[in-house]
Amino acid sequence: MATTHAPRPISKEEKKVIFASSLGTVFEWYDFYLYSSLTAIIAKQFFSGLDEGSAFIFALLAFAAGFIVRPFGALLFGRLGDMIGRKYTFLVTILLMGISTFNVGLLPTYAQIGVAAPVILIVLRLLQGLALGGEYGGAATYVAEHAPMGKRGAYTAWIQTTATLGLFLSLMVILGTRTALGEEAFADWGWRVPFWVSILLLGVSVYIRLSMNESPAFAKMKSEGKTSKSPLSESFGQWSNLKIVILALFGLVMGQAVVWYSGQFYALFFLTQALKVDAATANIMVAISLIIGTPFFIVFGVLSDKTGRKPIILAGCLLAAVTYFPVFNALTKAANPDLAAAQAAAKVTVTADPAECSFQFNPTGTLKFTSSCDIAKQRLASASVSYDNVAAPAGTPAIIKVGETVVKVKYTAEDIAEAKLAELSAATPVDDKAVAAAKKSVADLSNEKTAGNTMLAGNLSAALKAAGYPAKADMAKFDKVTVIIILTYLVLLVTMVYGPIAAMLVEMVPTRIRYTSMSLPYHIGNGWFGGLMPTTAFAIVAQTGNMYNGLWYPVVIASITVVIGALFIKETKDVDIIAKD
């Protein structure tokens, strides 16, 4: 039911609602993102029974577990929120998040209690994901149901800033602890301090939330005896409601999610991994762009009250789909111009039999990738070199071509002997003794494979260096202003799609099942499509070789959302959510 009311001034109680809900959600995001900021240390502390590479993969998988379980938290706490109330449900979620995070700081390491350490860590991570799955929907619903007509976008936009602010807070606490204790102490035990701090934040949040009142919409519905006795079956068992959930997921949240994670996480990963910018500089650049861009969550929330939510969200998705490829190309030229120039002047290709090329996913560290194609791709991936694939006839050994320079991937004993002869002849005339010495050096090799790998590394490094490929970004050529402008643009797209989304999701569903119905599509979209976006995108890059190909994931997802949203989603800004039951 659409109505028109003139927006009234914000009341003291409403200010308290926005502040308390936002502050609590900031602390939830702080707890959730501590893990991502400390993944490398956690890998060493809790997965030290594995080799370094596998330990890091398992640490990332434990991080991903928190995203995967979020929709189940939405179902669990959404049901409670629609049955017993918004206030008490997201009071429970913050208790669960805070206690789980604090216990990560107390957890013994692998060296102390063995395999029980990573098992307990993953359980705590799952509890964090469940808590976050219940927190966001509760906070957004609670604030929206307190907001007057014409200001829901403005009020709920404050909730939308909390993920960014929580990330900031986690980084600041980690940086402060690192600085105060020093790197050695921080790596040993100091990493626990940011987790311990969460108990203080929890105390503040619980104290504030206990003093809050239930939302007017839920209180009215409860007094009239209209609360849902079975929110799950109403939300997902009735087509009229299930259709709204499906449209919200594919026509709004899915695209919003990939744009959000592209602008704030993938951009940072792209700078450090693909463009070889040092981590400190990359973090500072992203932080500056977030400082500039964060107020626009509020700007677009306010604007959505005037022009509508749908045009702003879909415009952000459309701009992302159209501009991501040129924008990330421009980021390469600004952050690492030597790399951009080398890619243009001397393309790298891997020519190999496609049957030799494996899907290189090895979470347990037990698989061995020994084909020439796999070795070639591993070498280029470890050097962060973008390449194209060329199919070769069956049985043909793989080769790497850097510009016009051909680099063999596998080497025989004769190849190694010839290299030794060349090395000797560069220093002394080649005679019978030199030849004998070269052959003996090959015969004395305990592992021909090791010698071949050494030759590949040396030859590939020399070819890349000759073609102008830099080992890392030259900070003297790093264009800070342009990089900040580009990153700020990516953050602005985030604010366009994310600023109005909470208000629109609340307005799409009936009051009696609102907590459940809005939470599930949000957390499937952001937990699965969004949270796994960086991992999926870099898996695409690893398989195809082109460092820009990972962008196809957010581009395609955002494009699908634009089409579905434009055709099937109705504008909601004038819906009376008190009456929508």
Image (cartoon, rainbow, N blue to C red):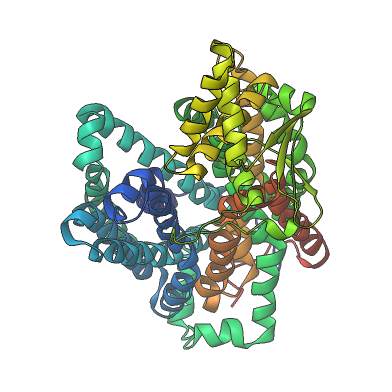
Q: At x 56% / y 55%, what residue is drawn? A: 369
For the residue pair 561 and 285, the one nearer the viewer reads as: 285
Q: Quadrant of residue 417?
A: top right
Query: For this view, does 69 lie left or right of residue 252?
Result: left
Badge count: 0
Residue 235 percent across, percent down from the top left = 58, 81
Query: For this view, does 526 lie left or right of residue 28?
Result: right
State which quarter of the image contains the N terminus: bottom right
Q: Residue furthest front?
A: 432
Residue 12 visible in the shown view: no
Q: At x 49% / y 66%, what residue is drawn? A: 68
For the residue pair 344 and 307, the one nearer the viewer reads as: 344
Residue 446 percent across, percent down from the top left = 42, 42
* 415 up-or-down from 52: above or below: above
Residue 242 percent across, percent down from the top left = 65, 80
For the residue pair 197 and 105, the one nearer the viewer reads as: 105
* 444 up-or-down from 521: above or below: above
For the residue pair 265 and 300, the one nearer the viewer reads as: 265
Q: At x 57% / y 86%, what residue is drawn? A: 234
Q: Residue furthest left?
A: 112
Residue 171 percent across, percent down from the top left = 38, 37
* 580 up-or-down from 25: above or below: below
Residue 49 visible in the shown view: yes
State which quarter of the image contains the C terminus: bottom right
Query: For this view, does 507 lie left or right of residue 368?
Result: right
